[in-house]
Amino acid sequence: MPRPLRFAMLGTGFWSRFQLAGWKQVGNAECVALYNRTAAKAKELGELCAFAPRIYDDPRELLCREQLDFVDIVTNIETHSQLVHLAAEHRVPMICQKPMATSLDEARAMVAVCERAHVPFFIHENWRWQTPIRKLKEILASGAIGTVYRARLRMASSFPVFENQPFLKTLEKFLLMDMGSHLLDVARFLFGEATSVYCTMTRVQQDIKGEDAATVVLKTASGATVVCEMAYAGTPMEHDRFPHTFAFLEGDGGSIELGADYWLRVTTRQGVQAVHAPPPKYAWADPCYEVVHASIVPCHLDLLKGLNGNGMPETTAEDNLHTVRLVFSAYESATTNEVIVW
């Protein structure tokens, strides 16, 4: 049996402990070092682990000292480019949290430097790995509802997301970067690439800097219209199921609804079929984030495939450039009130 891959986690904030738990769950990967610019925070996470990773407050020193198979970058977006370039310089494969970069040009430069260094570069885009979304894709691919001509994806919640991630309040670009990176990637996963995008956005809560509600309309190469609705606006909702993604797909042979509590209903001329697709339960997952945290495990497994040289994972950085382009095109559209066409 091959030895576990040795990795370092760069960043020890809110999501890092769930990332580490996910790696422990899948096995075949061993965290040997933690980096945080404030060493005490890295040490705090290290003390929660059943192992004893070495602690660094300088990523270059970490990369010089450690023998690594990959790094897992879980820092804030403004540091992603620097850390990716540094890992490429040391010829260390990397996984990076979404959103990849602060601009499309920056993302392209990150992909290019890894290509020149012949270093694998993947994005930890776990939203598409949620159990109900994978089941939705499976039903769609079966042809049960024929060709989709219209679809709606929705993730809007009153969940107080700023309580455990207060830095989100300070972001000039918030919702489209945060939730938009997820939801637009799911749109690509389900329906293929977009040929145009139109977006409106607003800020409902006045104590934050960025937008907290947005609607994005995509036209796909197959001719489908896909509406992506998202919000962390704090608006009270009767059927709030954070962090569920709701969906309604219309095809020329029927429809699929992904509703509350992980139920999918497929309606065709033959009748209605109900399918339940709840996520697996893990003791380490926060119950408030159950479906999201559970999706970390299959995402890790897919990324390990690429790190072990057994094929390409779904969410390579090159593939994620398409999602990054959608996000920044949505901002452009919202600013100019124009449809952006490719």
Image (spheres, grey):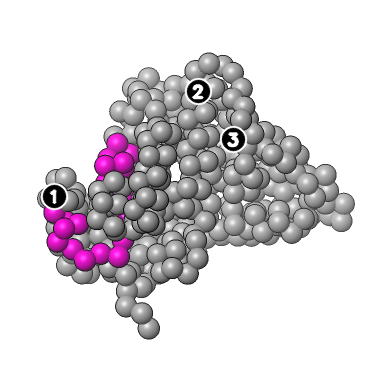
Which mark, by number, is residue 57?
1
Which mark, by number, is residue 332?
2
Distance between the alpha carbons at the discs numbered 2 and 3:
16 Å
Q: Amino acid at mark 3?
A: Cys
Residue position for label 3: 228
Q: Nearer the viewer, mark 2 or mark 3?
A: 2
Distance between the alpha carbons at the discs numbered 3 and 1:
39 Å
- 10 Å neighbourhood of mark 1: few (<14), some, or many (≥20)? some
- The answer to whether residue 15 is visible is no
Q: Amino acid at mark 2?
A: Glu
Magenta-tinted stretch = 61-83
Which residue extends farthest top? 336
Whether residue 2 sits left or right of residue 180 in the image: it is left
- Which numbered disc, 2 or 3, marks the residue that appears first in the sequence? 3
Badge 2 element: helix
| Residue found 29% across the figure and 57% down from its top | 91
